[in-house]
Image (spheres, grey):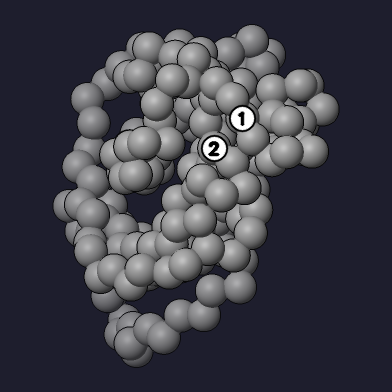
Amino acid sequence: MLIALAGCAQSQTPGNTETDTTKQVEKTDDKEDNLTPQAEERSDNERSTPVREDVCALYLEVLDDLWDVDPGLNSEISQIGIDLSELSHLTEAEKDTVMNEFASKRDLPYIPGTFEELCEQGFIDKQNLYWKDGLFFTIKTNEDAVWNLPIIKDGDPIPELTSFDAQKWRSGSGAYFFNQCTAQKKTDGAWSYTVGREAIS
């Protein structure tokens, strides 16, 4: 049973808004991958492992939904940062696919890396907790999730489940959080996810 749990690093504790909305993610059509140089270096090693488009579609939908909420945070940006390093549900090739697709849909360049790495590279002002012309997205597996599952009988399919947190961040006082998210793969192959709690700062 998959209990891949995902999440995002939070810069500070914001106010919370309860939600109970379920997001449905459909399978996507085949598309040619446009991988970063890092992905090209890994491609030979991962060639035998196909990219799972249904799982990529799930996390692309999460990023799309984060983009759409609190749109004021998206204003006047020329680049985006994305950190999927702690998203254990995806392979490295799948992470590259999700990041490329998300950035391409916005016609923006993206910088893969953690918050600390983007600070070290001079993109984020760490002292003032602000990214003047960028927006930082993270999704992180929630390794501490606890599941209450029904008894599975012989012949019943084993559910595929994952839990994660996600956020978009512009500054210490400008961020939006999807916390305690859960996702399940349906019998038709599509994934749906529910945001346990939304929060802003």
- Label 1 secondary element: loop
Residue at screen point 33% across, 37% down = 71
* Side (left or right) of 10 relative to 3: right
Tell me the quarter of the picture where residue 186 sits.
bottom left
Residue 100 lies, in percent from the top left, at 46, 20
Residue at screen point 73% across, 31% down = 125
Asked if marks 1 and 2 touch (Cβ < 8 Å), the reply is yes
Numbered label attached to residue 154: none
Residue 146 lies, in percent from the top left, at 52, 80
Residue 1, compared with residue 106, is above or below; it is below
Q: Residues within 10 Å of mark 2 (few under 14, many from 20)?
A: many
Tell me the quarter of the picture where residue 105 sits.
top left
Residue 64 lies, in percent from the top left, at 33, 37
Residue under label 2: 170
User: Can the viewer see residue 57 in this picture?
Assistant: no
**In the rendered structure, which amino acid carries the disc numbered 1?**
Trp
- Measure the alpha-carbon separation of dots 1 and 2: 6 Å
Q: Residues within 10 Å of mark 1 (few under 14, many from 20)?
A: many
Residue under label 1: 131
Residue at screen point 22% across, 25% down = 29
* Side (left or right) of 185 relative to 89: left
User: Which of 81/55 is in front?
Assistant: 81
Residue 33 lies, in percent from the top left, at 42, 15
Residue at screen point 22% across, 38% down = 27
**In the rendered structure, which amino acid carries the disc numbered 2?**
Arg
* Side (left or right) of 20 relative to 110: left
Residue 107, compared with residue 183, is above or below; it is above
- Mark closer to the chain start, 1 or 2: 1
